[in-house]
Image: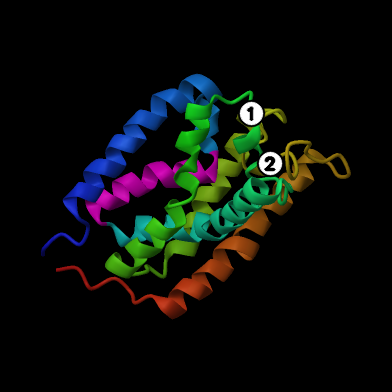
């Protein structure tokens, strides 16, 4: 079967990821890679090379809708100065070097790349199930291995300040329900309606 993903795209994407990893690691630390967006960035590299519809579908279910919100917040802040949603505020924080913030602009094309992959590879209907299982591993890891200063995937509350109106464990439990229910399932319904299943393997 001929490749469904151009070789130049695989090379360019992989080169970008290999550039980003050590710089992010040095500036933010390894726990930063527990963010679902960063997991999607890395896993998409694997999906590009393997042309695996399930991996691409999982990452699309996980981050396409949040990345759309990220982009809205980023461009509204860029053009109006108004902060919305609290997802992209670090892009305007001078404590982060400009080159690091430039690398973080991967958030802009990533959702479009994932949608293109669904078009090329097909949307695997098992994606929400497997992505939920992955989230139920990642969210507790974020909770137990990090602290509120990083607040990866908002396991300590929304935004940079977290929350104090309920026990931390209860917030985590609600988050583990909210991600599949409010993000993965709506994305699944959208993708199921608009993308064909992967072709049968031979």
In this rendered view, identify the residue nearer to me: 156 or 159.
159
Residue 61 painted magenta: no
Count the labels in the image: 2
In this rendered view, identify the residue nearer to me: 10 or 127.
10
Find residue 90 and report its horizontal and vertical position in percent.
Answer: 63, 35
Please state if 73 lies on the left or on the right of 134 as rendered: right
Please state if 163 lies on the left or on the right of 71 as rendered: right
Q: Residue furthest right?
A: 165
Q: Can you tell which mark lies on residue 146?
A: 1
Q: Residue furthest bottom?
A: 193
Q: Residue at x 35, y 63 (%)?
A: 116
Write the start and end of the magenta stretch as one range.
35-51
Within-10-Å neighbours for mark 2: few <14, some 14–19, many 20+:
many
Q: What main secondary structure does the magenta stretch of the protein show?
A: helix
Q: Residue at x 64, y 63 (%)?
A: 182
Where the N terminus falls, by quadrant?
Answer: bottom left
- Name the N-terminal-most of marks 2 and 1: 1
Q: Residue at x 70, y 50 (%)?
A: 80
Find residue 170 and report its horizontal and vertical position in percent.
Answer: 78, 46
Q: Residue at x 37, y 67 (%)?
A: 124
Q: How is the image coloured?
A: rainbow
Residue 43 painted magenta: yes
Where the C terminus falls, by quadrant?
Answer: bottom left
| CB-based contact (under 8 Å), mark 2 and mark 1 | yes
The quarter of the picture where residue 120 lies is bottom left
Find residue 106 and report its horizontal and vertical position in percent.
Answer: 45, 44
In this rendered view, identify the residue nearer to me: 161 or 143.
161
Q: Residue furthest left?
A: 1
Above or below 167: residue 202: below
Q: Which residue is mark 2?
A: 155
3D distance between C-alphas at marks 2 and 1? 9 Å
Check disc 1 and report its element: helix, strand or loop: loop
């Amino acid at each position: 079967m001929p490749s469904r993903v151009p070789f130049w795209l695989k090379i360019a994407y992989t080169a970008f990821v290999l550039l980003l990893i050590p710089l992010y690691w040095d500036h933010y630390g390894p726990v930063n890679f527990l963010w679902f967006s960063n997991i999607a960035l890395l896993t998409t590299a694997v999906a590009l090379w393997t042309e695996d519809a399930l991996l691409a579908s999982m990452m699309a279910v996980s981050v396409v809708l949040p990345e759309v919100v990220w982009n809205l917040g980023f461009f509204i802040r860029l053009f109006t100065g108004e902060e919305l949603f609290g997802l992209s505020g670090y892009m305007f924080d001078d404590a982060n070097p400009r080159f690091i913030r430039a690398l973080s602009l991967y958030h802009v094309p990533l959702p479009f790349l994932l949608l293109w992959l669904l078009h090329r590879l097909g949307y695997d209907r098992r994606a929400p199930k497997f992505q939920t299982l992955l989230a139920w591993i990642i969210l507790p890891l974020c909770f137990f291995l990090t602290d509120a200063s990083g607040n990866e995937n908002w396991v300590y509350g929304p935004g940079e300040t977290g929350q104090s109106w309920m026990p931390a464990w209860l917030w985590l439990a609600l988050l583990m329900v909210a991600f599949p229910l409010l993000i993965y399932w709506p994305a699944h319904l959208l993708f199921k309606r608009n993308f064909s299943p992967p072709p049968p393997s031979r």
